[in-house]
Structure formats: structure tokens, C-alpha cells
Image (tube, rainbow, N blue to C red):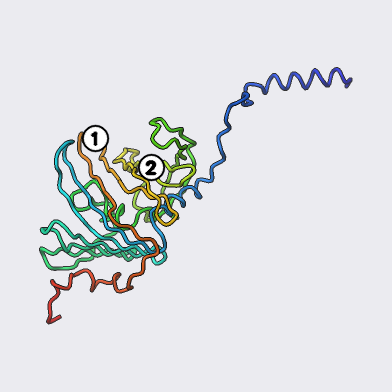
């Protein structure tokens, strides 16, 4: 082939490829390691040991005052143990949950009894709110039971954070015990904090959405302190969680994660 023919061949190839190449000034979508981004989102909410005190406000319609519940939660990520106790209102104070997978125990102060409940209870609404039990006692705990893939990068539209967000899809692995069939999660590309979660049933129906905001720095982590859960197909209803106290690498006794701890000391039977 002559040199002129070679040049003509190269030129023709470039003309074919030109529409596929980025124009000057265009940004190229960054390569996303989906599982790494998912783990960063988990790390923003939990350390190996985490203590949280929070308040949940349940509103059945916008503008309503709503019912307020306060609680404390202890989480041991290494051993996958969680314990949660309700502090207020007085009518529910003392109610507790203990998760020692695959077992889940519940204490009801009205009955004064402890019961072992099926793992499916993790999907139940907590205290009549739009948060599931799994959202509060073990957030992101089942990441190893999901296939995680990237759906791309979303540019900010509201101007609130000015940051790109990775969009990730979690799909439950066959035979896994993970709580949800599928999730779509928006995660800060730079900071790693979760910004939004959508939960889906096996049918593909979207069940609810959780929006995360009020991101603050705590012990080097970007932590959303306000979570708003909105059920699909329900106008005006919402549940808002506000973190009041958060401690990473918290020191607490292992006795916290025991069935004996479910019943508050004042409710314990002295003859037991």
C-alpha cells in the first residue's frame, strides 16, 4: 500500500469513529467500582461498633404535628448484632428489639413478655412508621448478599450539594436472606454518603423511598442526620428520622446483646 493510500485509509477510519469520540471539553464518565461505592455508603452510617440516639416523627399528612418516637440503638457490625430500645413516648417506652442473625427477639412492655419472631419481621414497619425494622437496627447489613452494579452517574439538579452521585443497583442473590429483592441507591461520588434509596418488591413494584439529607462530618465520615421515608402511592404520608447523638467505635458491654437485656430492669421479675 502506498503512503497516500495509507493516509486515506486512516482518514476514512477516523470519519467513522468521530461520532463515538468525545468532543473537546466534554467530560468522560468516571469509571465506577460499584461495590466500593456501596461499601463507602455503609461505612458512612456504621463503624465496627456504633451507638445512635434518634427521633422519628410519623405524619399521616403534610403539615400534621405527627407522632414522635425516641429510641437508642447499639450496633456491632463485626458480629452482626443489634439492640434497640424505645425511650418515648411513655406508652411505648421499654419496647426493645434484639437481632442476632438469623434470630430476632422482641420485647413488648404491655405484655411483659419476650418473643422470638421470624426474620421476615425485619421488613415490618417499625412502630407504625414508614421505616422497616431492618432500616434502623441493621442498615446496609446485607450488602454481601446482593449483586451490586452501576447504573451510571447523576449530575446534581437541585444545586444543594453541587456533587455528582453514583447510582447503584442492588439485586438480591439467589437463596440469600437479604431483606429486599432490589434497591436503587444514590451515593455521593466524592463524599460517599447515601443520598437516596428506593426499595422494590420481587414484582418490580417500588415500595418506598428514603431521602437522606443534613450531611455532617462525624469522626471522618459524612453522615446524613435526617432520613425521610415516603411510602409509594400514599399522598402526604412520611416518617422523618433525626439523629440526636451518634458515636462511632463506641464502647459498650457485650451484655447489651443478650435476651436478658430485652426486659428493662424496672420490669424484671425479682423472683426470676
**Which residue is labeled 2 in the image?**
195
- Please give the label number shown on residue 233: 1
Query: What residue is rendered at 15% in x and 80% in y?
Result: 272
Could you tell me residue 236's position as x and y percent?
Answer: 20, 35
**Residue 232 placement, left or right of 204:** left
| 86, above or below 271, in the image | above
Callout 1 secondary element: loop
Q: Nearer the viewer, residue 160 or 192?
A: 160
Q: Residue furthest right?
A: 2
| 93, above or below 158, in the image | below
Q: Quadrant of residue 205?
A: top left
| 226, above or below 93, in the image | above
**Residue 240 placement, left or right of 175:** left
Could you tell me residue 229's position as x and y percent?
Answer: 27, 43
Q: Quadrant of residue 71?
A: bottom left
Could you tell me residue 47's position as x and y percent?
Answer: 41, 60
Q: Nearer the viewer, residue 156 or 272?
A: 156
Cα distance, mark 2 to mark 1? 21 Å
Q: Tell me whether circle 2 and circle 1 mark residues in contact (CB < 8 Å).
A: no
Give the label, 2 or 1, closer to the camera.
2
**Residue 180 placement, left or right of 59:** right
Amino acid at each position: 500500500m502506498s503512503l497516500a493510500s495509507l493516509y486515506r485509509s486512516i482518514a476514512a477510519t477516523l470519519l467513522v469513529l468521530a461520532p463515538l469520540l468525545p468532543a473537546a471539553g466534554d467530560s468522560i464518565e468516571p469509571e465506577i467500582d460499584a461495590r466500593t461505592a456501596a461499601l463507602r455508603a455503609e461505612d458512612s452510617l456504621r463503624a465496627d461498633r456504633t451507638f445512635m440516639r434518634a427521633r422519628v416523627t410519623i405524619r399521616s399528612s403534610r403539615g400534621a404535628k405527627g407522632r414522635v418516637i425516641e429510641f437508642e440503638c447499639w450496633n456491632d457490625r463485626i458480629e452482626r448484632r443489634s439492640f434497640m430500645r424505645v425511650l418515648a413516648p411513655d406508652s411505648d417506652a421499654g419496647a426493645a428489639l434484639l437481632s442476632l442473625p438469623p434470630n430476632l427477639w422482641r420485647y413488648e412492655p404491655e405484655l411483659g413478655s419476650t418473643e422470638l419472631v421470624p426474620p421476615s419481621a425485619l421488613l415490618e414497619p417499625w412502630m407504625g412508621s414508614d421505616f422497616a425494622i431492618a432500616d434502623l437496627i441493621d442498615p446496609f447489613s446485607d450488602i454481601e448478599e446482593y449483586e451490586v452494579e452501576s447504573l451510571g452517574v447523576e449530575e446534581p439538579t437541585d444545586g444543594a450539594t453541587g456533587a455528582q452521585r453514583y447510582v447503584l443497583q442492588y439485586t438480591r442473590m439467589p437463596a440469600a436472606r437479604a431483606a429486599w429483592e432490589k434497591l436503587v441507591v444514590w451515593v455521593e461520588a466524592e463524599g460517599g454518603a447515601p443520598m437516596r434509596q428506593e426499595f422494590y418488591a420481587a414484582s418490580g413494584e417500588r415500595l418506598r423511598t428514603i431521602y437522606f439529607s443534613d450531611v455532617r462530618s462525624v469522626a471522618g465520615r459524612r453522615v446524613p442526620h435526617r432520613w425521610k421515608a415516603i411510602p409509594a402511592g400514599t399522598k402526604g404520608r412520611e416518617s422523618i428520622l433525626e439523629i440526636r447523638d451518634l458515636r462511632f467505635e463506641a464502647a459498650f458491654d457485650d451484655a447489651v446483646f443478650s435476651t436478658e437485656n430485652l426486659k428493662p430492669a424496672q420490669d424484671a421479675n425479682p423472683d426470676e
